[in-house]
Image (cartoon, grey):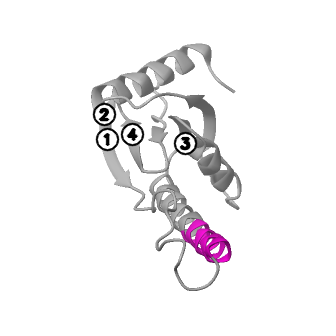
């Protein structure tokens, strides 16, 4: 019996602060940590007596901050997409909305892209727990023969 070529599998644990990429190829596992460098939630500077009306000034600064943060997250997702260019199957998991935002960015890719096997909710885990989660998911998936 000829053994077929091993497919490249990866799990990405992601939130808006950072991501852990857990790759599995030929029974070898590697973990890479990438920080988003996105600003945290906006906190307006200045007080109520800063120049201009406080409400108008606060709203303008908030919109600018939100727009900057949106672009920073987009750049973060694009950096992750470059890292998964040669991956066959992908598991995306983590807390919050970042996992769904990354999924949408991946679905926009024209041409070949990794098959997303699952998008799951998960809390922050240690590196060993991340590796165990990805290995467990893909070993069960192989037994079930996912489409």
x then y, percent, for residue 12: 47, 40
User: What is the distance, in whole Å, between disc 1 and disc 2 at their CAs?
Assistant: 10 Å
**Is residue 1 in view from this perspective?**
no
Circle 1 residue? 31
Please report contact status of discs 1 and 4: CB closer than 8 Å, yes or no. Answer: yes
User: What is the distance, in whole Å, between disc 2 and disc 3 at their CAs?
Assistant: 15 Å
Local secondary structure at mark 1: strand
Find the residue positioned furthest to the front. 49
Q: Earlier in the sequence, mark 1 or mark 4?
A: 4
Circle 3 residue? 88
Q: Earlier in the sequence, mark 4 or mark 3?
A: 4
Q: Quadrant of the C terminus?
A: top right
144 or 3: nearer the viewer: 144
Please report contact status of discs 4 and 2: CB closer than 8 Å, yes or no. Answer: no
47 or 119: nearer the viewer: 47
Circle 4 residue? 23
48 or 15: nearer the viewer: 48
């Amino acid at each position: 019996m000829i053994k077929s070529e091993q497919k490249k599998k990866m799990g990405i644990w992601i939130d808006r602060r950072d991501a852990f990429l857990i790759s599995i190829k030929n029974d070898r596992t590697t973990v890479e940590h990438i920080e988003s460098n996105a600003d945290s939630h906006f906190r307006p500077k200045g007080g109520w007596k800063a120049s201009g009306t406080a409400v108008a000034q606060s709203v303008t600064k908030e919109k600018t901050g939100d727009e900057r943060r949106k672009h920073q997250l987009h750049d973060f997702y694009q950096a992750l997409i470059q890292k998964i260019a040669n991956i066959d199957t992908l598991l995306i998991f983590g807390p919050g909305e970042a996992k769904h935002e990354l999924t949408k960015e991946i679905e926009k890719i024209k041409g070949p892209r990794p098959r997303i096997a699952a998008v799951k909710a998960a809390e922050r885990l240690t590196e060993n727990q991340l590796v165990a989660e990805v290995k467990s998911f893909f070993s069960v998936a192989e037994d079930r023969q996912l489409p």
